[in-house]
Image (cartoon, helix red, strand yellow):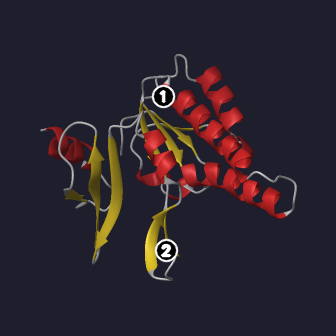
Amino acid sequence: QMRGPKLVIDADHRFMEVLDLAEGAVYALSDNPADNVDPDAISRILQEDMPGSGVQTIIIDSLTAIITPFVVQAMVDREKGRSKNLMAGFQKKALAMRQLQDAVTRWGTDSLWIYHLQDARDSNAASVVRSSITQTEIARLSRCINLQLQIVEDRNRRGIQVIWARRGRSGMTIWDDSGSWAGVPEKVEEAVYG
């Protein structure tokens, strides 16, 4: 429901499931699924296709699918003895994150960076909810985002909770009365900045 035309980097390969809810033109980054998870390909395609495109919003769905493979590969390389330094593997992840941010934000469009929350256990085996990207990555994202939002549910309704705002108010929840997020971006802006 964000401003269009929209360009979707469909790293989860599931955007088609909600395409009928989107208003206006929605463009795919590439017909090749592998391009949507490769920071080099994303950067190259945006560089080629964004000038003159009229795209108003770039949607990254999801950052989890792009960044997690770098973490897993670093851990596997360490486990298999291919790398003794886990931090060297994480450097690739950090560079990928930087490359993605630079590739997306250079156009001055709106952007929606989606990542997931997942159930996990803490060091005491207590149930917790964790972000699929680290706090370091969230901090890196904060250089180019104005709001951090979280989808919440209450019985049979969903809403957007404003977790953090660069400028303006945070902490409130804006409920989706339409069932398709229609009008919610405008309601969020009014609640935060109005």
Q: Is residue 138 above or below residue 157?
A: above
Residue placed farthest to the top in the image? Answer: 52
Q: Residue at x 22, y 41 (%)?
A: 189
On the image, the x and y values in percent for residue 13 come to 62, 54
Q: Residue at x 81, y 54 (%)?
A: 84
Q: Nearer the viewer, residue 112 or 136?
A: 136
Tag count in the figure? 2
Q: Quadrant of residue 93?
A: top right
Q: Which mark is residue 105?
A: 1
On the image, the x and y values in percent for residue 188 come to 23, 47
Q: Is residue 69 above or below residue 43?
A: below
77 relative to 11 in the view: left or right: right
**The C terminus lies in quadrant:** top left
Q: Earlier in the sequence, mark 1 or mark 2?
A: 1
Q: Which mark is residue 124?
A: none
Q: Nearer the viewer, residue 28 or 94?
A: 94
Answer whether residue 32 is visible to the viewer in this image: no
Q: Residue at x 19, y 43 (%)?
A: 192
Helix, strand or loop for disc 1: helix
What whole-number distance in Å separates the C-alpha atoms at marks 1 and 2? Answer: 30 Å
On the image, the x and y values in percent for residue 85 come to 76, 51
Q: Quadrant of residue 29?
A: top right
Q: Nearer the viewer, residue 131 or 158?
A: 131
Q: Nearer the viewer, residue 173 or 26?
A: 173
Pointer 2 residue: 119
Q: Which of labels 1 and 2 is toward the front?
A: 2
